Image (tube, rainbow, N blue to C red):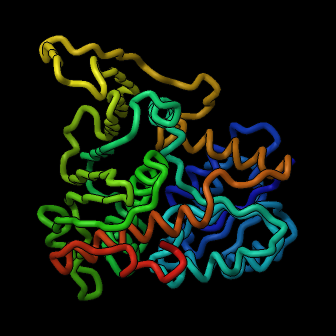
Amino acid sequence: MVRYGIIGVGAMGREHAENLRFIEGATVTAISDPDEGSRNLAQHQIEHPVAVFTDHNELLNSGLVDAVIIATPNFTHVDVLRDALATSLHVFIEKPLCTTIEDCLKVIEWSKNRTGLVWMGLEYRYMPPVAELISIVHDGGVGEVQQVSIREHREPFYPKVGNWNRFTAKTGGTLVEKCCHYFNLMDHISQERPVRVFASGGQRVNFLDEVYDGQPADMLDSAYVIVEYPSGKRAMLDLCMFAENTVDKESISVTGNAGKVESFLPSLELRHGKRSAVGNFKNWTHDASKPKVESRKVWNDSIKYNGFHYGASYLEHVKFFKAIQNGGTPEVTLEDGLRSVATGLAAQKSIAEGRPVLMTEVLPAGWN
């Protein structure tokens, strides 16, 4: 039995607890949160007795847990991780890793020479149609990747305790808080590290009249982001957070020199087609009205709980759990977390300054 403690039991912390309920051999034995309302909701949801703490250090030092899941507000990650990584416990950190590069680098340094596993929570790669898309691409199903396009058209940010997710200073900005998932996917799909980012975006519709303690909400609600890679591959994000009346809220398209593959959520659809000719186009012909595209639904029948992310969090927790049991290594690392934050911060900087931003401006020497 692996005993889990959850630090931060707001909506996402409680979601993690619900996923663990469906994994045989996993149990939540302790929770920690300074907010009484969140603690009460978590106790009600978990349905069996757990130790309850208001301070995360009390949980870390309780001797009641083997692993901790950190799902506190973004700006608190660095402080909680400093304490958690000083123990031998297994650690799962919810995205984003931290809100600044400096803090991400501190966490990576603290994580060295530990016996406990450290896993970065970037679960979008485990969504069934996305996982299938990645498999097709990495198996050469589109030839050499040229372009990756990701679109998310969705509802605004949900309310959070203390309204911390209304402020760039506390979240890292929308392109860190929300989009680090997508920048990680771009890197994972292309199997390269970005060199330059150009973005255009703004706060156009959401939270324009919201003010807390004299500070107006300043989260971007829409953006286009272009990410360039050393080989010439390019990726693009199209984000709109006032488009809740959208059928497929998330779509990923990967186009190579030999074909194209797309995934769609929540329809769980995957489309894959090969080009009729590759390389020699002297006598090339194509009827655009008759694309030869395979279209099918993709699901993973091993998923026992769908949750917020189409079963992806469940699959990720199964992998984390098995890695703990078997002494494995993390599939998603703190370096992945750092780089996803770095691209988001580069995009935020590009918008603020109205220019392309080199990743060498964001990451220190040795990380490019």
Rendered position, 353 above or below 204: below
152 and 295: which one is in front? 295
In this rendering, the answer to whether 269 lies above or below 170 is above
| Residue at (77% x, 54% y) in the render | 49
Q: Position of residue 81 (x, y in %)?
A: 65, 76
Residue 318, compared with residue 36, is above or below; it is above
Hey, which quadrant is residue 230 in on the image? bottom left
- Place of residue 219 in the rendered image (x, y in percent of width and height, measured from the top left): 26, 70
The answer to whether residue 163 is visible is no
- Which residue is more in the foreground, 38 or 254? 254
Residue pictured at 17% horizontal, 65% vertical: 200
Q: Which residue, as the protein is rendered here, is positioned at the far bottom? A: 214
Q: Position of residue 262 (x, y in %)?
A: 34, 31
Answer with left or right where residue 237 lies relative to residue 317: left
- Nearer to me, 107 or 53: 107
Q: Position of residue 302 (x, y in %)?
A: 64, 26
Residue 333 falls left or right of residue 202: right
198 over 75 or under it: above or below = above
Q: Residue at x 39, y 30 (%)?
A: 142
> At x 29% / y 69%, what residue is drawn?
347
Kindly tell me whether residue 117 is visible in this rendering. Answer: yes
Across the whole image, how many numbered discs are drawn on residues?
A: 0
